[in-house]
Amino acid sequence: EYERYRERTPNSKTMADELREIVPAGVCSTFRAYDPYPFHAERAEGTTIHDVDGNEYLDFALNNGTQLVGHTHPRLTDVATDQIERGTLYTRPSELLEFAATPLIDRWEAIEQVRFTNSGTEAVMHATRLARAYTGREKIVRMEGAYHGAHDPALVSKMPPLEQAGPAGDPRPVRESQGIPSSVPDDVLLAQYNDAESVEGLLRERGSEIAAILVEPACLNLGLVEPEDGFLQRLRELADEYNVVLIFDEVKTGVKLAPGGGAEYYGVQPDLVALAKAIGGGYPVGAFGGRREIMELIADDLNDGVATGAAHYGTYNGNPLSLRAVGVTLREILTDEAYDHVADLNARLATGYREVIEDSGLEAQVKAVGSQGMVHFTEEPIRTFRDWTHVDEEFHEAYWIGMVNRDVLPHPHDASQQWTVSVRHTAEDVDAHVDAFADLATHLSD
Ligand code: PMP
């Protein structure tokens, strides 16, 4: 399949070779580089992305799941064009702040106040700072193998190599990148997703040092791992018991599992929520919000030289272009009907996958929740990061590149990712996706 990929993408190859000379790895996020080279985008519209060799891919990757609204939604293009003429940056509040904040407050019971950022990384970073400010403690409990952004502590044990990670019951923190100070892991305590006892153990031992439990309601860096019954409820109880802030990183799950994200879907409200991606319909934005009592710490005066509150700065925070996109996406595009449409098509896609798997005799797990889904070629369901390490990544790679060669981008590159069904997809798109998989499956099962 690599050979076929190369034959189909000669212009991408030339551009990749040239770009690598001036841009490290030829990409602007390390995640985007893969073998033999990424295809280079020419343009995207609706549910299609075009490459520089004239290939058209039916897009279920949708920019790491950001575009639940699809590419170039006409309503968003209209308001963005209008907003460009009205100014893309004011660095002053405007009525757009209320326009964008209100739907988030309406969707999350936990969100009483909200601040906007430019990315999910910033949203998580500020939510954790705020939790530390609120509790006066420094350590953050996080789940091994989860992704929470690109800042230093978030890259501790994001996806550690098992040789370095120690036993599951006593995981050792691993820094993913050179350049992260050796002191950073001191403030990161590791638990296992779907193992509330691992969290409880840390709280019992070191509760008075712990500021927050940081968790994705469904783990979307392990394909699609859902919380087992009672897991999130137990985290809520533990956070209350030990006076620890419960932070849901809903950068991926937010507005995608349900209108009010994983909190609504699983019926557990955190204290703080970090958001980004789909809330902006493809425009760069993030947000963090939560209980008034915690959020109000940000408002405290920092200008007298003594920090009594928590700092949150940023030139592009709450820029009018992104705020307009958030407001229109949440108020006008992601309606109840849109959610019904996406859920129906997602179920159709998952059923299609299951049928192909049954017919081909492949060993695989298919999951679908809200707009998200995935296939993993494993015998056993995946519950934790340690389970995920049994995924045959080479086989998954053959699946991914085989689908791309069949003009379907099934999910962002990498077995840790998942598909997104958007409001723009149709039943025909879903059937074409399943047909491509059926064709590929006959080769994969050989
Ligand atoms: N948290 C989670 C759960 C994410 O999936 C991501 C991005 N994939 C981030 C945080 C970081 O968001 P961003 O890329 O916008 O900085």
Image (cartoon, rainbow, N blue to C red):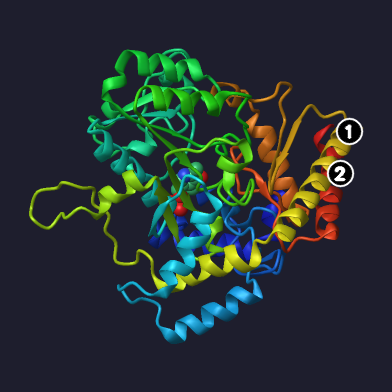
Nearest to N terminus: mark 1 or mark 2: 1
| 50 to 300, vertically: above or below | below
Crowdedness near tag 2: few (<14), some (14–19) or many (≥20) residues, C-alpha within 10 Å: some
Residue 360: mark in rendering = 1
For image coordinates 49% across by 34% down, the residue present is: 146
For image coordinates 40% across by 55% down, the residue present is: 114
Is residue 138 in view from this perspective?
yes
Say which quadrant the C terminus sits in.
top right
Crowdedness near tag 1: few (<14), some (14–19) or many (≥20) residues, C-alpha within 10 Å: some
Reading the image, the residue beneath label 2 is 438
Q: Dots 1 and 2: beta carbons under 8 Å?
A: yes
User: Dot 1: what SS?
Assistant: helix
Is residue 284 in view from this perspective?
no
Q: Quadrant of residue 166?
A: top left
Between the residue at mark 1 and the residue at mark 2, the CA separation in whole angstroms equals: 8 Å
Q: Identify residue type, mark 2.
A: Ala
- On screen, residue 444 versus residue 61, left or right, reads right
